[in-house]
Image (spheres, helix red, strand yellow):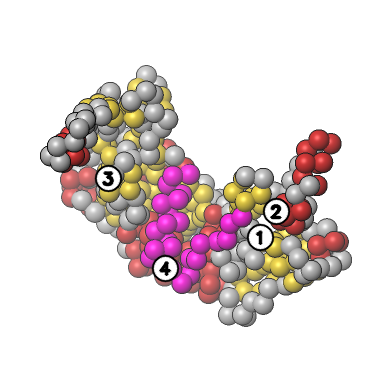
Amino acid sequence: MSPENENKIIGITISIVFENSSMNRDQSVGNIMTLKKLTIGNTDHIMLSRQWMTNKIINTLVSRFPDDWKPAPLTVAKKVIQYELLKPGEKIKVVGDIINYAELDAFGYMSTAEKKKRKKEQEEEDSDKESNKKNGIQVTLTRKAPVSATKAISLYPWKGDMGFYANHAMVSRYNETSPEEPATPDPYSKEECYSLFKFSVTIDLKMLGEDTWFLPDNVINKLDIPKIEDKYGTVELNKEKKSLKFKLNPETKTKRVLQILDVLKDGLIAHGSGENYGIIPLFIVAAPVKIPIPLFHSIIQVNHETGKIVVEDMLNIIKDNGYIVREGDKPIVYIQSFRKDILDEKDTEALSDYCGYNGFKDYIKDYIENHKK
């Protein structure tokens, strides 16, 4: 294997540790608002779902970079909400694609054709002309997410903490108006948690910025190909292969990758149950990798007695794992702690040898823009 292929970057892995109260609630049981939980060994740990965390990344990107991360169009087919990619008509229009919508590029999509219906269902639908117009394209298009996330898992076990609440303030305000029937408080209980969480994101650079649709003849022949400015990317129709290929240019691809890194490092918008803690990293580790997997996720642990992140295993991974890209013998790794008490002083010194955030971004930018294949 040539040195160039040996250090070919296929992905980027980012793991963060943050402090939070669990805001991603589970299904309520009676008047008890429960938390999402996982059992690890013989202890319960709180989790924030992968879908919830992904939505926080998307919402933050849309808020922070509104011109570059416009929300992708949605549609409803048979009461199911999904992304709208193709719009039927005399000409079939492409209304959602990875070049115009970074959300579709980074986080994937599913736009499904309708299943074949039973005779009775078909007769009912035939009477609804509007429904036939809406669902006239029998094409299923899917894209795996190049930017994939894990659940966020609490690093301390849940001890059964519970809070009891009632709407006393509103009841008092209402009763001050001397109503005929005074109101009484509506009590409820909430499972509570405040903990450190670990969370990882992996970016597949090989998948990001490229997408191919395979379409039937009846769609290909009526297709209205979107006009894309060359500065963003290209769209190529191949009638022989019945395919429509989208490809971002390296500069736009780089911009999206760096924007994702920026919001993960700086923090995510996160509200839940009326609380706004945000998701602000206390510790972050990232590296370009030859295989897009979350290398650091499983080894991030906290010493429950000291409250410090255990760094020794992380340093061993950085030293010995062959997936981490290196310059010579030096691994390309970005590590930073944002609160002094999260690491031992000796660990802080051990991590100081690795590159800073700007150097890490420059390395990624240079690689994407100069390795176009």
Q: Counting residues from the N terminus, which is met first, the one under dot 2 or under dot 1?
A: 1
Residue 71 on the magenta segment: yes
Given residues 225 and 337, the one toward you in this image is 225
Q: Which residue corresponds to mark 3?
A: 275
User: What residue did someone put label 1 on?
Assistant: 85
Count of numbered tags = 4
Q: Given this view, does label 2 or label 3 mark the residue nearer the observer? A: 3
Using the numbered discs, state the Cα–Cα distance from disc 2 to disc 3 in whole angstroms: 37 Å
Q: Which residue bears the numbered disc 2?
A: 141
Q: Callout 4: helix, strand or loop? A: loop
Cα–Cα gap, marks 4 and 1: 22 Å
Q: Which residue is mark 4?
A: 65
Q: Amino acid at mark 1?
A: Leu
342 shown above or below 143? above
Task: Reply yes or no: does residue 303 show up in magenta.
Answer: no
Please, what secondary structure does the residue beneath circle 2 have?
Answer: strand
**Between 27 and 15, the one nearer to me in the picture:** 27
Amino acid type, residue under disc 3 in the picture? Glu
- Residue type, numbered disc 2: Leu
**Is 226 situated left or right of 61 in this image?**
right
Mark 3: which secondary structure?
A: strand
Residue shown at 71%/68% (left/top)? 93
Q: Which residues are magenta?
A: 51-75
